[in-house]
Image (tube, rainbow, N blue to C red):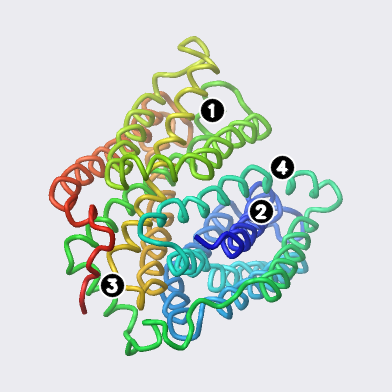
Amino acid sequence: MKRSPLLVIFITIFIDLIGFGIVIPVLPFYVESDRFNATPRSVGLLFASYSVMQLIFSPILGRLSDKHGRRPVLLLSLIGTGIGFLIMGFATTLWMLFAGRILDGITGGNISTAQAYIADITTPEERAKGMGIVGAAFGLGFIFGPPIGGILSRWGIAVPFLFAAALAFANATLLYFTLPETVTADHPARARSPESRWALMQRSLKHTRLAFVLLIYFLFVIAFSIMTTTFALYTMYRFGYDAQHNGYLFLFIGTIAAIVQGVFIGKIVKRFGELPMVVAGALLFTISLFAVPFVGPRAGGLVALLLITGLLSIGNSLATPALTSLTSRSVGRGEQGSILGVTQSAASLARVVGPLLSAFLIYSATSPPQHISDNSVRATFWTASAIMFIAFLAAIYFMRSHAAEYNETEVAPVSS
């Protein structure tokens, strides 16, 4: 495995996710500040616009990286992210905020390209460990990003956006001078004929092996999105926690994710393989989501809450890099960027569905309206648990029906 390029990719994703994490705690307050006086609905639409753009453009960026190389696409995406943050930082009207966020969503779908780069420089046996680097960078980015955003906001509500822009441009400079290209003239991706995004999605879903991986990944992200959207409301209702307390909890979740995916994934996949990791991760995720409504100040307290969130983080951290690795191993070297772009599109769609579903559930079982209750907490987290249970059953079936194929050193790719 080539260590130096992996280190550069890790730093690239890490800095990118710090920038993303910086704006998470600040954006709602920024939108509703005196500068814009926007409604909470505008805040939701602003968050959704980012995911919708990633849904549309992640496969396009992945396909462009197959055709023109990983390096220029990564470079372009970082520059676009920097410009998007600049627009938001200097915005004076609501439409400028949407323009900056939409631009960031269009160019910010670079995770699939980074994953394709990892696929280019790793062997099939090392693939899950390499993909774990992406997860570790995610975890660390969410550890450091939100606290940095909160601290910087003391000097002005727009300062975090300007700092995130500076990080993106610095990241682009680092990548330009240190990251070599992997899609060389003899790379299989160069020989592939162009294929439309919809044709690629249809072809992907026609193959049982790949369709199952995408389905399980989609369900994982929906459940995780429901959790992240409603978790702060749940802890506020049950424990009386504020934003600072929840920041500590997400710090705990992110730390566990970074340790599992950055340190242990390689050893675990070498011993057990990707498919058992997906099954185990889905089971832990299902159990932890189901258990959340039973926890409260008089029912286990903070210790129980930390235990459950720890299991949840471990489950997600085991399954996510394994699913990405299985996706990568399901296709040939010539379409890594394209298919991983489809994967990220599925994740982006799930990040639209999950928050919308959680927004309905957290209030649907309450009386009076617009107030959280025990019924709404159960409805929300048990729905997420049911979604994960379906993913667990699908993973078991998938492991039993396709384990022999993935036990081979190199899996035969799906054909067009």
On the question of residue 53 being in view, the answer is no
Number of disc labels: 4
3 or 1: tag closer to the N-terminus: 3
4 or 1: tag closer to the N-terminus: 4
Of residues 373 and 323, the one drawn nearer to the viewer in this rendering = 323
For residue 201, which numbered disc appears in the image? 3
Q: Position of residue 233 (x, y in %)?
A: 53, 34
Mark 4–mark 3 Cα distance, whole angstroms, equals: 38 Å
Image point (48%, 18%), residue name: 304
Q: Position of residue 78 (x, y in %)?
A: 64, 71
Image point (41%, 51%), residue name: 321
Of residues 242 and 388, the one drawn nearer to the viewer in this rendering = 388
Mark 2–mark 1 Cα distance, whole angstroms, equals: 24 Å
Residue pointed to by mark 2: 18
For residue 204, which numbered disc appears in the image? none
Where on the picture, by quarter, is residue 20? Answer: bottom right
Q: Identify the element where label 1 is drawn.
A: helix
Image point (63%, 55%), residue name: 14
Mark 2–mark 3 Cα distance, whole angstroms, equals: 31 Å
Q: Position of residue 387 (x, y in %)?
A: 28, 42
Determine crowd level at label 4: few under 14, some 14-19, many 20+ residues with C-alpha closer than 10 A: many
**Do the residues under discs 2 and 1 have CB atoms within 8 angstroms?**
no
Q: Residue furthest left?
A: 401
2 or 3: tag closer to the N-terminus: 2
Image point (35%, 60%), residue name: 124
The residue type indicated by label 1 comes to Thr
Residue pointed to by mark 1: 235
2 or 1: tag closer to the N-terminus: 2
